[in-house]
Image (cartoon, rainbow, N blue to C red):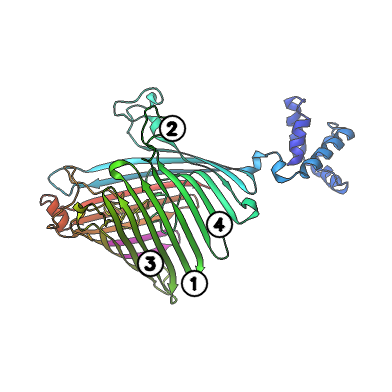
């Protein structure tokens, strides 16, 4: 590669057709014969070919060889960047169709809806040397038909307020440095995805058509048997230095902490974390700390267990915060079964607020999770003021085909607190009011959900997914919803093509 770089500079005065001829000579059958002679003379085969064809003189060849030797003797950080070997192209195209009926749990109102959406990601990874990488990942996320006309892109905003330019964004852009100071330390600075553990408190939320990334910095230390990450991110900037209007300088949202993993601890994986969140935006003010532990390990020959628990403390707008959450589960892989049959049981709980009017909060803040595959595929339930009993049966009837059935039984932890969705905000009635009964008279029974899902890895790059779910409202939903409690349905079909 160094020879080609030097030759390119040495022969730059030649006509383009001559340069093409040089490449042709290097690939010709005669070049192979000459290369054998060059190896005996310890000379680069390409240079020998050029000498034999009269393109280079002996003196020019010696000058080029001296320059090549000088370049190879340079330290890695002094060498010129050769883009051909250092750039990786990464991409993903994902298309999904979703349909939902009876979102308001009322049959009297027709609200059957469906939509087609796509997400396109294109990334370039540039390795400037063995220890440094720059990643740039663009993302276009859109719902089909959401634009009045694609011809107005970049010029006008259509009548519905959605323009092409609003769908294209920078999903990730960071610089990563490994072996900092010759130590087992790496840094990553810029916009980046953050995912830890089962993503119950920190995740990239890849199911979403946009996903999640953070503007910040991460420091990773690899020790003897463990990995520790320390990070700080700036989630919301309310008063940029570029803004014309003045405003307070403490009304932003910051999120950071330390997450440590022991991947081979007593035959399993053990994590511990301490996270800090500060949101200074007026009515949504919160400053809390979350400490937690996670454990996953096999027991016996065919079974396994998992546990994650977190305690949260700090302050909210008018008082203190004290909350907790945990999830515990176990699974069993049926032995001597060629279809990979597995059964699993899980129980999740997150505390709620027993008296919403006292200024204090006991509602667990789920932070920035990936909830879609945790508490029902319909995304009606988040890890806040909830109790969820989950039963799962899964199998692999074919090598690249998987099927699963999940059953969820949802209840409120505190009857006087709201029913929170997967995004963390309260679910809303058809009138736009939160599902909450501050008297607690509506009870705690939220409902039951059953999910059927199928996934197929057609190839290393092509993946297909499909699913159908149905939610059956409980007494709480029916009471708050004015006596209406009809079941809700949802389905999806998804295809994805990706290159790494």
The residue singled out by tag 3 in the image is 307
Q: Residue 35 location in percent, x, y?
A: 82, 44
- Is disc 4 placed on a helix, strand or loop? strand
Residue sticking out furthest to the left: 483
Q: Residue at x 70, y 38 (%)?
A: 80
Mark 3 vs mark 4: which is more N-terminal? 4
Q: Residue 275 location in percent, x, y?
A: 41, 55
In the picture shown, does residue 62 fall above or below 14?
below
Q: Which residues are magenta?
A: 391-407
Residue 489: image tag:
none
Q: Residue 158 location in percent, x, y?
A: 32, 26
Q: Nearer the viewer, residue 380 or 48?
A: 380
Distance, label 2 to label 1, CA atoms, is 50 Å
Mark 1, Cα crowd under 10 Å, few <14 / some 14-19 / many 20+, is few
Q: Nearer the viewer, mark 1 or mark 4?
A: 4
Mark 4, Cα crowd under 10 Å, few <14 / some 14-19 / many 20+, is some
The residue singled out by tag 1 in the image is 267
Examine the rendering and report whether any part of residue 24 can be seen. Answer: no
The residue singled out by tag 4 in the image is 221
Q: Nearer the viewer, mark 2 or mark 3?
A: 2
Q: Residue at x 15, y 48 (%)?
A: 106
């Amino acid at each position: 590669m160094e020879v080609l770089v030097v030759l390119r500079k040495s022969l730059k005065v030649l006509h383009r057709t001559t340069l093409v001829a040089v490449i042709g000579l290097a690939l010709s059958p005669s070049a192979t014969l000459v290369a054998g002679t060059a190896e005996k003379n310890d000379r680069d085969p390409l240079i020998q070919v050029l000498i034999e064809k009269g393109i280079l003189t002996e003196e020019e060849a010696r000058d080029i060889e001296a320059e090549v030797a000088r370049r190879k003797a340079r330290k890695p950080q002094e060498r010129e960047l050769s883009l051909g070997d250092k750039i990786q192209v990464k991409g993903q195209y994902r298309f999904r169709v979703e349909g939902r009926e009876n979102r308001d749990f009322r049959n009297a109102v027709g609200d059957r809806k469906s939509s087609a959406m796509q997400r396109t990601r294109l990334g370039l990874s540039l390795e400037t040397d063995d220890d440094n990488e720059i990643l740039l990942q663009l993302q276009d996320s859109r719902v089909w038909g959401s634009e009045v006309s694609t011809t107005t892109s970049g010029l006008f905003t259509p009548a519905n307020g959605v323009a092409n330019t609003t769908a294209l964004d920078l999903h990730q852009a960071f610089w990563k440095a490994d072996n900092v100071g010759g130590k087992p330390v790496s840094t990553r600075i810029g916009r980046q995805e953050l995912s830890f553990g089962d993503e119950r408190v920190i995740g990239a939320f890849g199911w979403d058509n946009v996903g999640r990334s953070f503007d910040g910095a991460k420091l990773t230390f690899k020790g003897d048997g463990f990995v520790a990450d320390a990070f700080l991110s700036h989630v919301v900037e309310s008063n940029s230095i570029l803004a014309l209007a003045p405003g307070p300088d403490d009304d932003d949202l910051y999120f950071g902490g330390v997450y440590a993993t022991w991947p081979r601890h007593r035959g399993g994986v053990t994590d511990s974390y301490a996270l800090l969140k500060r949101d200074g935006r007026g009515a949504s003010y919160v400053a809390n700390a979350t400490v937690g532990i996670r454990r996953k390990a096999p027991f016996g020959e065919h079974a396994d267990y998992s546990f994650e628990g977190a305690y949260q403390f700090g302050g909210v707008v008018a008082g203190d915060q004290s909350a907790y959450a945990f999830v515990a589960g176990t699974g069993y892989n049926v032995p001597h079964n060629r279809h990979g049959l597995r059964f699993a049981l899980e129980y999740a709980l997150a505390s709620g607020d027993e008296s919403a009017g006292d200024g204090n909060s006991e509602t667990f803040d789920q932070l920035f999770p990936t909830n879609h595959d945790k508490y029902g595929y319909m995304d009606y339930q988040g890890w806040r003021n909830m109790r969820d009993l989950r039963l799962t049966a899964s199998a692999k009837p074919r090598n690249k085909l998987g099927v699963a059935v999940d059953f969820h039984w949802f209840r409120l932890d505190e009857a006087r607190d709201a029913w929170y969705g997967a995004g963390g905000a309260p679910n809303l009635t058809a009138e736009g009011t939160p599902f909450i009964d501050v008297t607690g008279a509506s009870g705690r029974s939220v409902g039951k959900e059953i999910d059927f899902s199928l996934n197929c890895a057609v190839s290393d790059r092509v993946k297909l997914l499909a699913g159908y779910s149905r939610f059956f409202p409980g007494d709480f939903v029916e009471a708050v919803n004015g006596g209406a409690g009809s079941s809700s349905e949802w389905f999806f079909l998804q295809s994805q093509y990706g290159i790494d």
